[in-house]
Each structure stands twice: as structure tokens, then as C-alpha cells.
Image (cartoon, coloured by chain):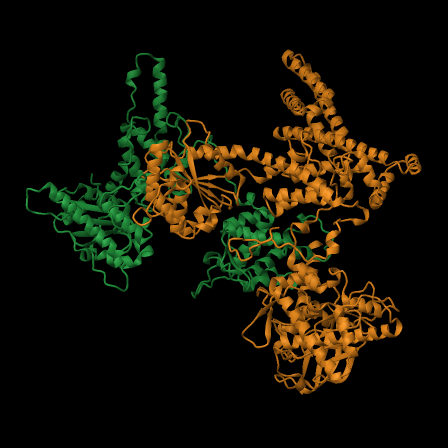
């Protein structure tokens, strides 16, 4: 945390700005993921422990990966050194040696290793030393810079590079002659050397530049022994080089393709040597769930070692959230000795922790022990004694498991090498990671039984080989462990001696002796495995201190879906924010009847941005900002009315109510106290406008809006793949609901005025035929009124989502087909709590809707939907609007993802239709899915 | 030494330079400009010393800035080698490389310097000889790319310097392609070297035969090498007649070709050793006519494989030679089968795309291939999940027999550009249809399709796309700095690769392509 952070420094790619405006109160409190059962400063203590464990593991992991990579790097270096020796005789010209190392992204450990070996000063005498120049795509945007980088890379790194040159009358810095002069000099001074050019992220280089580079360099070989090493992230097949570079360039090169061992094997080795090796104690044992996640993520998303280490690290970090992990290594709790630790525990602040510890320990005691414990509750030291016992037991068991597992793996490998199938034959090719996870779950019985059976069938040589393998296995065990396995080791030795004796004398008639021997070995193996592998680590008391077990691994940490989360947070702020300000108001208002609790909030209860987002979803491709503002103002008006009502009640009922006021609410109070009505309205209007602007800017900031210069007062939507609540509005039959409408800004003719008095009714059906179910209003002038309250009749049909509202102008005719009245439709919505049913005719009409959807297909008919201008039916029912995920919301989202934003489905539907189509696609997906499943 | 086939050209060129050198010569050689260059340089070297004839041969592809060109020409004309110890100092005490004027002054300075030194030598005589100069620019087409402004000044260099100077351009492209549209470049003296005949080509390749006493390049084999090359020429000439290419293929095939003879020789030698006294009789000799015919017959099929692998450089000559060693004792075993390759040589394993990529990336790649191959409008028909949509699927367009424009499948027209949303949508369908069973269980997703829907919005999907773009398996078409609108991509894998990926994932690719093969 440096005080002078240079925010205007262009060379800094990232600047860390610490969060400084935390409440002081909050900053003083120490953080704890589970404060109700933690000791003070527990989290910091555990973080220390975590660091200790992680550093140990990371060192181990790095050592292993280094051990795996060194021989590969050595191979590459050997080839590099021979690049100019052993050239095939008879070639017409010297080619430029190029080593294409595939599967190397970023700073690959292998190439680092190669460079380290090449630049090693203490190499043997007979090896030609090498100089390495690094080229990075960002520095090499044109040929001049590339040449300069390469030449300077060699020249400036060498001690002779300091010779002064006059910039104008000596060779240019990008002239390869300069390199030639330097090389000639260096060779006379130091003898032969090789010039290795390492090109990082080769795919990112501009092919034209690289072509020129190769062209120039090839003219100077072999006078300048240049060797190129390309770090390719693409696979060797299909070859990137051959796909991008022309033959003329390829003809200059002698390309060696180098494929590095598959990452799968590396990860298998890494895990087995970190967590399943008797010689290494990782401190925290990885559980099967974390292991499974690692395996899945590795095969499915990211095959890099970095990702594997990150996952292990996260699992560790998450593990120390548990307060009990304070006892990971010892019982001292960061105190010098156990006595002071006891004092720390006796501190009243530690009581919640202690309570929890007691409960945990007691729950695993026998009744007798429990009673003894309860009588002697203050005996903390014996409690810590129990923890120590558990720790010893866990580590013992863990070690036993590792040995047993190691042996099983050896035998498995031996048997597989003999050509036997693995036990999981149907899932052949499953990796060791899978076996590991099954082992931790205690589900290896089938494996060792199968292996035992195979052992019993082995012939003399094979059995000899197996016993050799077993003997090596025991010999490889670390000292401390070795003694524990003395008995079994000796047994194996005896068997082997017996077998050798059998082989030499060959007096085994009918192979009876061999048969007995092999079945003995088989039995021993099964017994050995049973003893070590059937016991699960999470059966040990307090296992969760040392073992991550089956704690779920949060994949959201590694692989989140930010866009979906933002959208869902906007749609359902109640699940993200601790509390919604207006929700509180509603709760207080509805205190007499607790109906509101547990239900979803109504639109007016939401924060401003969410209210705007609702409007956003209901709009078409373009949003008229003025209309948006109007609908926002309408919702705020409801909010204000409710607020006033509740405030009024509060003032009458409990004037001294000390509940938290929110800012706006207190604004409202002030407004109420204002005398002049007009003044108040004006102030309210200003507030609405300000809140609207703020909300719109928030959406704009999150990238939901795109400004368009084409149409005044309009912005373009950028997100289409979210279900509009319009299509999934769910109303309860028999309760009062509100339907609202506004003018369609995209389709101003005919206007609401033209429509005039209109019949409003609930209908079902398709684009050609519709059936009236309930008349809501015989005549409403839609140009003067913008909403209508109604109560759906429960008997008009069953629970279904096929209902829509039809607007039929009484006087105005459809301009295209004057014989019909002008019509407009709402999106389909759901009615619940219904008791009626559809008649067969009606059902037929509804069924036909899937082939004759209400939508673009019907534009030619009398029921022209394109003339719809009573466009958006937004629902503002008092209690049940915006159901979060009614059955079609998700799939329709994915259906729309195929289409809307990219034209794949080519939806040209207006504002009015989006919801309908979304619902139709959603339904289609549901039915298809069912078919697929069945 | 003048290379075979270029005798007349060399004579012509020598005569031109020695009598009255034209100011600007353009040598246009479509097939083998590199060989012409070497002929020109050997002619220049062989020119008589009196009067002094200075020359500079410059490869234009190395001179990507004007300064480099000036430096190189002056350095070579003055025969000056900059050394590291002297701070890489250039010739002369002035700066010649600042601009074209400086360059002209530099040329004059060289001329003056040279005439001084030559007069000093011939002080007794009164005639002062101004040196002649030739500046040869190889791969002159690169000038058009790097230094288009210098084309006209260079072609009029003799005029501007007022020196006895010739500028020679050598290029595989005709002068009309290089000549700037504006500006007055003089017409050059246009020279086209003759096309190489078969005999000349073979002779050129034979020149690369490294004659040493070691086994496979023993001078004894020269006649056999001629015959070998003649057959090789017949096989390769429809595709390439470039002597360098032929020499390359020959270098890769020859060691294998002579191995049976050497094997036979060794066998005889071993037999002879068992029989003392006969040793001297077994010197390495050229094989009999019968053996030659057999060899050629056995090896001719492998010439084609060599051409197919080596001409596009799918493999390098060294590796190919090791991978295609013939079986041991081919001649004595009486083998006459088609495949002479020794199978015991382990083939180098190749990590294929399907082994390297994670599962999700493979799906993304496949989705990108589909998005690049299928017309945008066909998506709902191909991937729509409603029952009715399936029936409407139309498979391909059958070309009518009665003429008209034949619709070429998109696969042959190159990939279509698609926005990232489209590939994600296709990916969603692919995941839902072909990946649903292999995913780890996620009980939190209850609705059908919800799981796939979430999967395609995850960070790893986007990073997968970025990674594939970094590998250039996808190409980003829209510039990365443009924030407006979705990024546009196109797929860069072939149909064959896509098929392999699809097979690996268990996706019936042909059912998903709008116009399958």
C-alpha cells in the first residue's frame, strides 16, 4: 500500500486502490466466516496456518513439475545443440533450424528450463555455449523492431556489448550485419557459440513480420548459427505453421516438431506425489469432492497446471474457514505452549468456539464417556488431549491409506502392463484421478478383488515380476513408514525366495506349488488392501480438521457466470441485497396480515434500477426513453402512495417507532409536510427524474444500453436473452389484478387516440381464431386511461399460460382490412388458482397456436398484429407480479440466446411479441427435452 | 564456373557490362531467380580487373529501410567490412545514409577514391580511368513493399550520379508489376534467362552431390545418381522443376536409395572376410544395370510420397529420410512388394488436436465450425428444438441439371463470419444434445436446458474462445479495440479436422451441416 499511487503512470497495467472508506467500526472487527463459533483473531491465525500448509504443498508441486519437465527440456536442449551438426548431405542450401514446441502458453516451465540449461555457464567443456534472445509479440509489431529486438537481445546481453557506436556513421541497430560483426568478434574471443532466438506466444506474431525475419536470417546461416525456438500454444496437428505461412517461407526452415507429454500424466503424477505419497504429508488432505471437481474442470475447461494449483489452493483456503482447523498442527493456538492456549480458551470471548468444540467432541463419545465428560466439564486439557489423539489417529490412518493405495496403484499398473483390462473396463481410459477419488470414498473393493483374482492366475515369470514390484515398493518407502510395514515386507521376501527356489528346481509337477503360491499372494494382497483401504478417512473423529472430505467445492469461485448473475440480481434483488428499503415499508404496512412475508416483492418494492430493468425487458429492440420514464414514474407513484399510506399509519399508530428510515422515505415525510401542493408535485417530479437518470446510467454503465444516433430519444437494448416477465407473468385467479398499457413508440400509427373506446377481454386461441373467456371492460378509452383493474374469473379455464388480453376497438377499423375492427394483443400470461377447463374446441385452437403462432406469420390476415400499438402490457398487480422463474423462463432464455441477438432465429418481433415468441421457443424446448429424455 | 543452361545468358551479360553498360537492366526470371542471381554474381566476380569494376549485390528483402539499402550498397561497393572493435564504423568519414542525396555523394566518393587508387598504380600513364560500377538488387519486388519511393531514383541512378554505373534488378515478377504508376522510370533493358531443360536441371542438381569417399556419396555412384535424378525429375516435373526443390527431395531420398547397395556390399564383404585373400576384390562399385533397374522400380512409388511430404514441407528432409529407410537387405531378399519402408523405425508420435484441447474447447470449436459453415438463416431449421422444426429441415440444394448457377457448398467457399452470440447459441444446443449425460450432476438446475444455458455464460466458455483465438483455431475478425457490438469470429479449421473433433465428442457432424458432403 504505497501512499503515492501513480494513477497516471501509463506503464502500470494495474493499480491497486485499497478500500479506504470502510466504516471504522467494521474495520476494527476481525473478519470471520463463522463468527458464532470462532475465537477472537481465529481467522488470522488460521490464515497463518493455511500459508504454512500451502507453501509446503506448493514447493512440493513445483519440485514435482520441475522433475517431470527437466528431462523433456534436456531432450530439447540436446537437439538444439545438434542443430548444425549432422546436416543431411546434399541439401541445396542451409536451412534455418526451427524448433516448434507445442502446447506452451505463456511462461512455460519447460521453456524456462530449456533457457536455464542453455545459459548454464558451468556446462561441460565439449558443449557449445548458447546465447538466448527473447522475442515477444508485443515488441515486434514490424520487421525493424523485430530485428532490433533480436540483435539487441544478443548484443546487449553479452559483456562485449558495451562498445560505443556512433549512431549515424556505424551500422544501424536493426542491421543484421551488426550481429555478424558482434558474432565474429565474440567467436575470436570466446570460441564457437550458438544463437538461440526464443519466440514467445508465436501465434500472436504478425505472419508478415515473421516471414521477413526468417527471410533475412536464412540468408545468414550457417555463418550466424541462428536457431529459432517457437513456443506454440496450438496443438501440433493441424500445424499452425503450415496453415499460416506460405511454402516459400517454410522451404527456408528445417522444422522440428516437439510435442510435450500430455498434461494429464503430469497432473496425475503431481497429485499422487502430493496427496498419495507416504513420503510426503501435505498437512491438509484433499477430499474426493474437491478431487472430482479438479478432474472435471481439468478435462472439461482448462488443461493447465496453473489451474490445478489454483484449485488446490482454493480448496485449502476454504478449508481453513472452519474454526476447528486451528488445531491443524498442534493445540497451541499460536501461543508458546499449551498452557497459555488453555488460558486463551478459558477467555469468555472464546466460549462460542469452546461450546462448538464440546458439542463436536461429545457427539462422537459413548454415553459413558459423555457422562464422565459432563461431570468434568472444566477439564480443558483433557479436551485438548482428545484432539491430539484424533490427530495422531488421523495421520496414522492417512499414512496407512496412502501405502495401501500406492501398492494398489503399483499392482494395477503391473497388471495393466501385462495386458489385462482394468476393472473399470466399460469406462476404459478413465484416469488415475478417478481411482483416487473412489479410494477416498472407500469404493475400491471391486478393484482389489479383481486384482487379487488376476494375481491368482499369474504364471511363474509374471508372479516373479509382481513380487519384484512389491519388493521395490516396500524398499521405496520412507524410513519411518518402512518399519511399520516390516512384517509384510518380510512376507513378500519369503514368497519371492520360495518362488525363486521353485524356478530353479523346477520340480513343480502340474504347477500345484505355483498355484498355491500365487493364490497365497492374491489372498495376501486382498487382505492387505482390505486392512488399509476400506476405512474411510471421514470416519475418524474430528476428521474435518485435516481433511476436506466431501465439502462441496464452489465452482463459482473459478468459473462464474457474471452476466447471468447481474441479470438475476437485477430481476431478483431480494436474493442479493440484505434488505430492500421499500420492502421494509411494505412489511411494516402489512404487519397486520403477514401475507407479504415469504412472497416475492412487487415491482414497486424493488430498487430503482430493478424497476427500470423490468421496463427494459418489456421493451422492443429500441427503447423510447420518454416512455420508459413515464412507466418508471408510474411505479414510483405507487411506491409513493404506499409509502405515504404507511407513514400515515405509522404517525397515527406509533409515533415513536424507531425503525430505520430510508432516505427517500424521509424525503417523502418532508414532502408531506410541505404546504403547497404544486410545489410538492414539482419536487416529486424532479426527484423522479433524478432517480430515473441515475438508474439509466447504472444500466448504461453495466452495458445494457447502447446509444443510437439514428432515432431521437431512443436507446438500443443490448441484452435480449433474458426472459421478459411479460411472457411469464403469473396471476392468481380470483384476485384483483392491474393491466397497464402505453403507446408503442416504434409503431405510432394508429395511435391510442385512433383506437379510442376499446373492448378489453381475456382470450385464448391462435392467430386465426380466438375465443372470448372473460370480458374485462365493454368500453374503455385507451387514450385517456392507461390501466385497468380486474379480477380474473377462476372458472374461465384451467391453470395455464396460454391466456392473453385482447383489445378490440369499438369504432376504429384495421386500416389494411377495414372489414375487421382494429385489434391488439398482450403477451401470453399464466393464470393460477383456476378451477375451470377449456372446451375441446378451445383446446384445439390453443393447440394450433404452436403451428400458427401469434406472430409474424399472421401479418397477412385480418388480425394484423403489426398494427398493434397498445403495445406493452405491464402488469402491476399488488401482490403477485414478476414470478421469478415460472416454468418457461429459463429455457426460453436459452432459446432466445440462439436467436434474438444474432439473427439466427431471425425474430423480427416487436416489443409486443418478444414475450410470446420467447414463450413459444421455451415450450418447444420443454417438449423436445422430454422427447429426448424418453 | 558458369552453371549449365546459363552459358548464353552469362555471355550476353558479360558483353553488356564490358562494352557499354546500360544504365538500367531488368532480369526477369519467373522460375529460378535465385539461380540467376548466383549466375550474375559469378559473372561479376569473373569480370576483368582493368578498368576496375566495382559491384554490389544486395538482397532487397533484407533492406527494409532506405538507410539499410544505402549502407549495404556503399559497404559492398567499397568492399568494406565493419568490425566490432572499431565500433562497427561504416565506410568513409561522412554520413552517406541520411537521404538519397547523401547516397549519391557516397557513390561519387567511392568512385573518386577508386580512381585515385587506380591512377596511383598507373602513374606513368596519363589516362585516368573512372571505375565502372554495377549495383545488383536481388528480389527487387521487395523494394515495392518497403521502399516504393526509391524505385524511380534507383532506376535513374546513373543519370543522377553521372557515373558509369549500371543498376540491375533481378526479380521473379515482371517490371510492369513493379513500375510505379506515377513518376517516370526509364524503360530497362529487359533480359529473360532461358528456361532450363531437363538435362540442365539434372546437371544443376548433380552439382549439389557432395562427393566424398564415404559410403552413400561415393563418386562411384554418380552415374546411378544421374539415373536416379532422371526418374525423380519425371515424377516431380509436373509439379516443380525448381532445381533446388529437386535437390532437396533427392537429398532426402538418396541415402535410402543407396542403402540396399551398401547392404549388399557389406554382405559380400562379410562373406569375403570369412574367405581370406579375397578382400581386395570387393571394392565398392557401381551396381549392375539389372540391380539399377530393380532399385528404380522398387523406389519409384516412394518418390511420389517424398514429393507429397517434402514439397509442402510437411516434414523436413532429415526426418523424412529417417522415417523412410528401406528394409534391410532389400536386394538380396528378392523383395518385390509395394511397401519397401522399414516398419521397425518408430514413427514420431503427433499430439493431435483432440488430445490437447479440453472438452469444452472442442465443443466451442465444433460450434464455431457449424456457425462458419451453415448459413445464418438455417440455424432455426437445423437446431430448432420444436417437434415441427425437425420435419422442415431441408437437406442441401440439389443442383438442377438444366444449367443455371450451381450453388457451391459453403464448405468450399470459406468460413462465414459470425458474431460471438451465434456461436454461443449453437454451443448451447450442442451441449444440451450431446454433453448433458457426461456433466457432473447439478441439482440446482431444475428446468430443462437451464444447465446448458448457464454453462455457455460461464467465464471458462469465454476464456475458451479467447484461447482458441490465441491458438488461431478461431480468427477474430473484428478489431479488438472495438467495443461496440459483439466481437466477430470465423473458424479456421478444415472439414476434416472438424470431423475428427466431432467423432471424438460423439457428435454426428454431417447431420448438423446444412449442406453435407
- Residue B368, percent across and down? 55, 55
Residue A843 in view of the camera: no
In this view of the protein, which residue sits in the foreground, B230 or A670?
A670
Q: In which quarter of the image is residue A375?
A: top right
In the rendered picture of this protein, how many numbered marks are placed on residues? Answer: 0
Q: What tint does the image give chain B? A: green
Q: Quadrant of residue B214?
A: top left
- Residue B114, percent across and down? 16, 45
Residue A93 in view of the camera: yes
Instruction: Relative to B73, say whether B388 is above or below.
Output: below
Instruction: Relative to A603, say whether A520 is above or below.
Output: above
Instruction: Relative to A590, say whether A424 is above or below.
Output: above
Q: In which quarter of the image is residue A637?
A: bottom right
Is residue B25 rendered to the left or right of residue A344? left
Is residue B167 rendered to the left or right of residue B260? left
In this view of the protein, which residue sits in the foreground, A505 or A189?
A189
Residue positioned 17% across, 49% down in the render:
B111
User: Which quadrant is the C terminus of chain A positioned in?
Assistant: bottom right
Is residue B97 rendered to the left or right of residue B377? left
Q: What tint does the image give chain A? A: orange
In this view of the protein, which residue sits in the foreground, A863 or B45?
B45
- Residue A487, percent across and down? 74, 20
For this orientation, the residue located farthest to the front is A3
For this orientation, the residue located farthest to the bottom is A811
- Residue A360, percent across and down? 84, 41
Amino acid at each position: 500500500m504505497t501512499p503515492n499511487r501513480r494513477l497516471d503512470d501509463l506503464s502500470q497495467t494495474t493499480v491497486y486502490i485499497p478500500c479506504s472508506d470502510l466504516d471504522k467500526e467494521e474495520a476494527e472487527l476481525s473478519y470471520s466466516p463463522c463468527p458464532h463459533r470462532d475465537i477472537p483473531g481465529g481467522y488470522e491465525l488460521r490464515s497463518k496456518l493455511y500459508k504454512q500448509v500451502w507453501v509446503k504443498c506448493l514447493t512440493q508441486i513445483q519440485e514435482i513439475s520441475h522433475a517431470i519437465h527437466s528431462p523433456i527440456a534436456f531432450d530439447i536442449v540436446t537437439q538444439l545443440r545438434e542443430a548444425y551438426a549432422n546436416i543431411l548431405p546434399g541439401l541445396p542450401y542451409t536451412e534455418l533450424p526451427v524448433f516448434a514446441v507445442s502446447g506452451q502458453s505463456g511462461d512455460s516451465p519447460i521453456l524456462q528450463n530449456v533457457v536455464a540449461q542453455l545459459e548454464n555457464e558451468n556446462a561441460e567443456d565439449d558443449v557449445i555455449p548458447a546465447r538466448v534472445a527473447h522475442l515477444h509479440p508485443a515488441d515486434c509489431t514490424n520487421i525493424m523492431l523485430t530485428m532490433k529486438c533480436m540483435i539487441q537481445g544478443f548484443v546487449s546481453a553479452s559483456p562485449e556489448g558495451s562498445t560505443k557506436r556512433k549512431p549515424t556513421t556505424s551500422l544501424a541497430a536493426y542491421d543484421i550485419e551488426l550481429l555478424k560483426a558482434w558474432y565474429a568478434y565474440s567467436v575470436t574471443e570466446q570460441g564457437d557459440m550458438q544463437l538461440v532466438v526464443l519466440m514467445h506466444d508465436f501465434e500472436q506474431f504478425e505472419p508478415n513480420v515473421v516471414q521477413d525475419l526468417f527471410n533475412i536470417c536464412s540468408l545468414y546461416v550457417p555463418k550466424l548459427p541462428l536457431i529459432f525456438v517457437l513456443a506454440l500454444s496450438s496443438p501440433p496437428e493441424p500445424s499452425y505453421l503450415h496453415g499460416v505461412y506460405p511454402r516459400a517461407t517454410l522451404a527456408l526452415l528445417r522444422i522440428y516438431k516437439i510435442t510435450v507429454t500430455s498434461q494429464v500424466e503430469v497432473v496425475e503424477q503431481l497429485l499422487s506425489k502430493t496427496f498419495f505419497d507416504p513420503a510426503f504429508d501435505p498437512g491438509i488432505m484433499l477430499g474426493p469432492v474437491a478431487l472430482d471437481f479438479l478432474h472435471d474442470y481439468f478435462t472439461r475447461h482448462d488443461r493447465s497446471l496453473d489451474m490445478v494449483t489454483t484449485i488446490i489452493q482454493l480448496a485449502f483456503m476454504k478449508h481453513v474457514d472452519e474454526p476447528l482447523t486451528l488445531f491443524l498442527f498442534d493445540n497451541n493456538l499460536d501461543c508458546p505452549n499449551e498452557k497459555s492456549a488453555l488460558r486463551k480458551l478459558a477467555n469468555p470471548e472464546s466460549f462460542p468456539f469452546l461450546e462448538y468444540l464440546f458439542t463436536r467432541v461429545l457427539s462422537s463419545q459413548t454415553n459413558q464417556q459423555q457422562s464422565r465428560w459432563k461431570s468434568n466439564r472444566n477439564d480443558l486439557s483433557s479436551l485438548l488431549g482428545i484432539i491430539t489423539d484424533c490427530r495422531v489417529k488421523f495421520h496414522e490412518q492417512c499414512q496407512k491409506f496412502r501405502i495401501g493405495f500406492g501398492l494398489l496403484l503399483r499392482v494395477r499398473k503391473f497388471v495393466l502392463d501385462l495386458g489385462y483390462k482394468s476393472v473399470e473396463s466399460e469406462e476404459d481410459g478413465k484416469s488415475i484421478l478417478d481411482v483416487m477419488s473412489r479410494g477416498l470414498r472407500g469404493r475400491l473393493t471391486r478393484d482389489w478383488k479383481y486384482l487379487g483374482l488376476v494375481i491368482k492366475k499369474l504364471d511363474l515369470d509374471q508372479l516373479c515380476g509382481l513380487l519384484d514390484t512389491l519388493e521395490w515398493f516396500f524398499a521405496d518407502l520412507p524410513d519411518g513408514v518402512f518399519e511399520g510395514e516390516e512384517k509384510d515386507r518380510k512376507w513378500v521376501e519369503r514368497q519371492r525366495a520360495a518362488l525363486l527356489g521353485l524356478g530353479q528346481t523346477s520340480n513343480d509337477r502340474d504347477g500345484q506349488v505355483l498355484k498355491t503360491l500365487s493364490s497365497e499372494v492374491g489372498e495376501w494382497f486382498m487382505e492387505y488392501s482390505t486392512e488399509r483401504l476400506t476405512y474411510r478417512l471421514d470416519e475418524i473423529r474430528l476428521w474435518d480438521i485435516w481433511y476436506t472430505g466431501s465439502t462441496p467445492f464452489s465452482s463459482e469461485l473459478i468459473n462464474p457466470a457474471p452476466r447471468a448473475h447481474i441479470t438475476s440480481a437485477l430481476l431478483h434483488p431480494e436474493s442479493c441485497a440484505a434488505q430492500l428499503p421499500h420492502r421494509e415499508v411494505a412489511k411494516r404496512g402489512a404487519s397486520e396480515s403477514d401475507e407479504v412475508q415469504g412472497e416475492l416483492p412487487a415491482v414497486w418494492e424493488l430498487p430503482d434500477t430493478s424497476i427500470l430493468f423490468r421496463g427494459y425487458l418489456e421493451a422492443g429492440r429500441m427503447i423510447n426513453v420518454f416512455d420508459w420514464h413515464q412507466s418508471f414514474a408510474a411505479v414510483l407513484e405507487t411506491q409513493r402512495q404506499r409509502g405515504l399510506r404507511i407513514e400515515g399509519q405509522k404517525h397515527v399508530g406509533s409515533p415513536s417507532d424507531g425503525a430505520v428510515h430510508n432516505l427517500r422515505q424521509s424525503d417523502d415525510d418532508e414532502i408531506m409536510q410541505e404546504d403547497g401542493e404544486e410545489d410538492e408535485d414539482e419536487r416529486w417530479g424532479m426527484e423522479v427524474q433524478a432517480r430515473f437518470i441515475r438508474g439509466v446510467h447504472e444500466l448504461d454503465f453495466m452495458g445494457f444500453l447502447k446509444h443510437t444516433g439514428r432515432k431521437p430519444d431512443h436507446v438500443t437494448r443490448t441484452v435480449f436473452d433474458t426472459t421478459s416477465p411479460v411472457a411469464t407473468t403469473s396471476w392468481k385467479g380470483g384476485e384483483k389484478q392491474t393491466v397497464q398499457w402505453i403507446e408503442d413508440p416504434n409503431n405510432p400509427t394508429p395511435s391510442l387516440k385512433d383506437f379510442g373506446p376499446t373492448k378489453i377481454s381475456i382470450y385464448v386461441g391462435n392467430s386465426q381464431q380466438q375465443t372470448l373467456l372473460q370480458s374485462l371492460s365493454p368500453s374503455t378509452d385507451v387514450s385517456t386511461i392507461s390501466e385497468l383493474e380486474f379480477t380474473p374469473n377462476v372458472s374461465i379455464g384451467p391453470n395455464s399460460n396460454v391466456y392473453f388480453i385482447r383489445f378490440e376497438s369499438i369504432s376504429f377499423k384495421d386500416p389494411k382490412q377495414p372489414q375487421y375492427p382494429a385489434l391488439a394483443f398482450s403477451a401470453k400470461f399464466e393464470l393460477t388458482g383456476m378451477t375451470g377447463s377449456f372446451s375441446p374446441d378451445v383446446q384445439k385452437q390453443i393447440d394450433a397456436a404452436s403451428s400458427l403462432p401469434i406472430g409474424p406469420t399472421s401479418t397477412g390476415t385480418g388480425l394484423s398484429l403489426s398494427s398493434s400499438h397498445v403495445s406493452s402490457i405491464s402488469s402491476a398487480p399488488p401482490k403477485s407480479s414478476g414470478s421469478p422463474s415460472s416454468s418457461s423462463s429459463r429455457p426460453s432464455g436459452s432459446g432466445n440466446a440462439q436467436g434474438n441477438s444474432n439473427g439466427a432465429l431471425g425474430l423480427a418481433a416487436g416489443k409486443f411479441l418478444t414475450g410470446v415468441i420467447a414463450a413459444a421457443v421455451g415450450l418447444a424446448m420443454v417438449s423436445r427435452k422430454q422427447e429426448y429424455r424418453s | 564456373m558458369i552453371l549449365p543452361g546459363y552459358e548464353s545468358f552469362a555471355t550476353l551479360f558479360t558483353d553488356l557490362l564490358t562494352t557499354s553498360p546500360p544504365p538500367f537492366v531488368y532480369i526477369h526470371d519467373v522460375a529460378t531467380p535465385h539461380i540467376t542471381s548466383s549466375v550474375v554474381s559469378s559473372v561479376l566476380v569473373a569480370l576483368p580487373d582493368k578498368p576496375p569494376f566495382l559491384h554490389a549485390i544486395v538482397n532487397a528483402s533484407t533492406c527494409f529501410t532506405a538507410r539499410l539499402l544505402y549502407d549495404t550498397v556503399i559497404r559492398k561497393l567499397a568492399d568494406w567490412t565493419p568490425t566490432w572493435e572499431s565500433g562497427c564504423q561504416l565506410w568513409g568519414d561522412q554520413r552517406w545514409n541520411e537521404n538519397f542525396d547523401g547516397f549519391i555523394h557516397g557513390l561519387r566518393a567511392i568512385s573518386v577514391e577508386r580512381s585515385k587508387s587506380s591512377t596511383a598504380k598507373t602513374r606513368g600513364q596519363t589516362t585516368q580511368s573512372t571505375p565502372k560500377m554495377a549495383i545488383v538488387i536481388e528480389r527487387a519486388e521487395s523494394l515495392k513493399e518497403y521502399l516504393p519511393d526509391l524505385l524511380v531514383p534507383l532506376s535513374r541512378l546513373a543519370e543522377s550520379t553521372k557515373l558509369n554505373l549500371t543498376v540491375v534488378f533481378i526479380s521473379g515478377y515482371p517490371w510492369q508489376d513493379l513500375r510505379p504508376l506515377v513518376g517516370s522510370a526509364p524503360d530497362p533493358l529487359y533480359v529473360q534467362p532461358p528456361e532450363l531443360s531437363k538435362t540442365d536441371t539434372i546437371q544443376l542438381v548433380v552439382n549439389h552431390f557432395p562427393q566424398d569417399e564415404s559410403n552413400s556419396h561415393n563418386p562411384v555412384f554418380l552415374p546411378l545418381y544421374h539415373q536416379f535424378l532422371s526418374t525423380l525429375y519425371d515424377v516431380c516435373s509436373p509439379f516443380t522443376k525448381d532445381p533446388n526443390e529437386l535437390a532437396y527431395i533427392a537429398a532426402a531420398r538418396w541415402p535410402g536409395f543407396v542403402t540396399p547397395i551398401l547392404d549388399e556390399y557389406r554382405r559380400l564383404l562379410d562373406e569375403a572376410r570369412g574367405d581370406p585373400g579375397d578382400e581386395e576384390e570387393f571394392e565398392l562399385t557401381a551396381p549392375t544395370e539389372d540391380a539399377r533397374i530393380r532399385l528404380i522400380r522398387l523406389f519409384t512409388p516412394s518418390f511420389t510420397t517424398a514429393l507429397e511430404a517434402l514439397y509442402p514441407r510437411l516434414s523436413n528432409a532429415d526426418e523424412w529420410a529417417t522415417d523412410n529407410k528401406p528394409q534391410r537387405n532389400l536386394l538380396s531378399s528378392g523383395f518385390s512388394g509395394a511397401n519397401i519402408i522399414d516398419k521397425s523405425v518408430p514413427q514420431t508420435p503427433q499430439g493431435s488436436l483432440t488430445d490437447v484441447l479440453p472438452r469444452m474447447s472442442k465443443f466451442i470449436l465444433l460450434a464455431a465450425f457449424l456457425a462458419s459453415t451453415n448459413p445464418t438463416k438455417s440455424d432455426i431449421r437445423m437446431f430448432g428444438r420444436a417437434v415441427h422444426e425437425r420435419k422442415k429441415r431441408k437437406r442441401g440444394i440439389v443442383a438442377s441439371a438444366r444449367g443455371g448457377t450451381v450453388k457451391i457448398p459453403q464448405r468450399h467457399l470459406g468460413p462465414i463470419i459470425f458474431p460471438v452470440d451465434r456461436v454461443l447459441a449453437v454451443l448451447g444446443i450442442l451441449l444440451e444434445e450431446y454433453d448433458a449425460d457426461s456433466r457432473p450432476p447439478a441439482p440446482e438446475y431444475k428446468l430443462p436446458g437451464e444447465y446448458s444455458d448457464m454453462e455457455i455464460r460461464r467465464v471458462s466458455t469465454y476464456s475458451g474462445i479467447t484461447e482458441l483465438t490465441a491458438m488461431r483455431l478461431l480468427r477474430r475478425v473484428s478489431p479488438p479495440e472495438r467495443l461496440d457490438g459483439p466481437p466477430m469470429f470465423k473458424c479456421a479449421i478444415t472439414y476434416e479436422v472438424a470431423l475428427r473433433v466431432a467423432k471424438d465428442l460423439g457428435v454426428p457432424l454431417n447431420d448438423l451441416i446444412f449442406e453435407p458432403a
